[in-house]
Amino acid sequence: MNFFGTNLTCQRGGKLVFEDLNFSVESGSILILTGKNGSGKTSLLRIMAGLTSHSNGLLSWNDGSVKQEPERHKMRLNFVGHLNAIKPFLSVRENLTFWAQTRGVKITDVHSTLVKFELQHLASIPTQYLSSGQTRKLALARLLLCNTPLWLLDEPTVALDPQSIITLEEIIAVHCKNGGIAVIATNFDMNFPDSKELNLHNFSPANQMARHFVQ
Amino acid sequence: MKNFFLLIKREIKLTFRQIGDSGLVVTFFVLATIFFPIGLGPEPDLLAKIGPGIIWVTALLAAIISFERLFSSDYDDGTLEQLALSNTPLGLISLIKALAHWVTTGFPISIMAPIVGILYQMPEKGYLVLIITLALGTPTISLIGTVGASLTLGAQRGRILLALLVLPLMLPILILGTSATDAAIAGISFKSYLLLMGALFLGSLVITPLATTAALRLALE
C-alpha cells in the first residue's frame, strides 16, 4: 500500500495555506505533520480524508486517484478530528456501537475495545458525564473497532493523560506493524521508533517565494 | 439499507432522550393559537373564518423555530463529518432528519390542530380536511427545512437567515392547505388541492435530498 500526494495546494477563505506539497507514506509507516498554528495541518488531514477539496495537485492510493473513487477511499480510512462525534445523551457503549455498525463491524469487539482504553466501567453511563480526556479516548476507540488501513489523526493527544498517550502510541505502533498507515497532525512529541516528519511550514506561500528567489 | 434503519433507530433514541425539545415546539403551537382568539375577542363568525389560516400559519412558524436543530448539533459535535465519511449517502441522512423532524413536530401538530380548532368554533365539516392537509403538508415543510438548515450551517445568525430563506418556499403549501380547508367548509370539492399537495410532497422528496447533499458538502469543507 502506498498513499501519496503530489503538488497539493490548499486555499482557505481565499488565502493560500500551503502549495506544492508532496508527501508519501507506505504500508507500515507513520507520517507526523508538524508546523505552527495555521500552517495547514488540519487542512491537509481533511484533504487526505476527502472532506476538503484541494485546489491543485493529485492525491493517490496505490495507482488510483482518490478523487476518482471517493467511496472506496472513505472505506479505507478512519478520521479522528478535533471534534469527537460523540452524543452526550447516548451511553459510552451506544456511541461506540453506532459507529461500529455504520461501518458494518461486528459489535462483539466493543467490550474489549473499551477495556483497552480503560472505559469499560463507564460503558452504560451517558457520555455527558465523561471528562474531556475520557471523551477523547472514546473517539479514539473508534480506530480499533473499524479496522481500516489508513488512520488520520488530528491532535490525538489533546486532553489525554500520560498513561493514555502511551496506550495510544502502542495502538498506533501495532496498527503499523500490521501493515497500516497512520498520519498524525501534532506538535506533541509522540514517541515512535521510526516515523517520518513533514513540516508544513516549508510549504507555506512565504517560504515558497523565498525559495524561488534563492534559485 | 441496513444503515438506514440504524440511523432511524438512533435518531428516535436521541429524540426520546431529549423529548423536551420537541415538546416545546408543540407547546408553542398550542399557546400561539390560543392567543389569537383571546386577542381578537369573542366573535364566532370572525374566528370561524380565520381559524384554518391561523392554525396553518402558526404550524409553519412552529416548524421554522425547530429547523435549526435539524443538523446543527450533529455539525457542532463532529457527527456530521463522520457520517459524511461513512458509506451512508448524505441525501439519505437528510431524509432521515426530515422524517425525525416530522414525527416530532408535524405529526403532533396535525393531531393537536382539531383540538385547537374548537377554540375557533370551526364548522365540523372542516376538521377532517384540516387534519389531512396538515398531515400532507407538514412532511413537505420538514423536507424544505432540511435544505434551509443545511444551507445556513455554520453561518453567523443563521437562525434568522434560515427563517427568511424557507418562508417564501412554504407559500404554496400554505395557500393549498388553507384553500382546501376553506373549500371543505364551504362544501365545494377540495380534491384538487389535496392532489397538488401530494404532488408537492413527492416533488420535494426527490429534489430536497439533492440540494441538502450539496449544501452539507459545502458546510463540511
Image (cartoon, coloured by chain):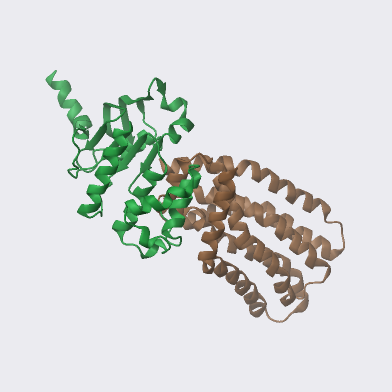
Chain colours: A green, B brown
Front-lying residue, A157 or A210: A157
Front-lying residue, A135 or B27: A135
- Residue B123, compared with residue B104, is above or below; it is below
Q: Position of residue A39 (x, y in %)?
A: 23, 38
Residue that protrudes farthest toward the bottom in the picture: B42
Q: Position of residue A194 (x, y in %)?
A: 19, 33
Q: Position of residue B209 (x, y in %)?
A: 58, 43
What residue is shown at x 24% (from left), y 36% (from top)? A33
Image position of B214 (left or right of A191): right
What residue is shown at x 85% (from left), y 64% (from top)? B186
- Residue B155, compared with residue B213, is above or below; it is below
Front-lying residue, A66 or A176: A176
Image position of A66 (left or right of A194): right
Residue A12 sits in which quadrant? top left
Residue B111 visible in image = yes
Q: Position of residue A158 (x, y in %)?
A: 25, 51
Image position of B172 (left or right of A59): right
What residue is shown at x 59% (from left), y 49% (from top)? B5
Q: Quadrant of the C terminus of chain B?
A: top left
Residue that protrudes farthest toward the top in the picture: A215
Q: Quadrant of the N terminus of chain B?
A: top right
Residue B73 visible in image = no
What residue is shown at x 29% (from left), y 38% (from top)? A174
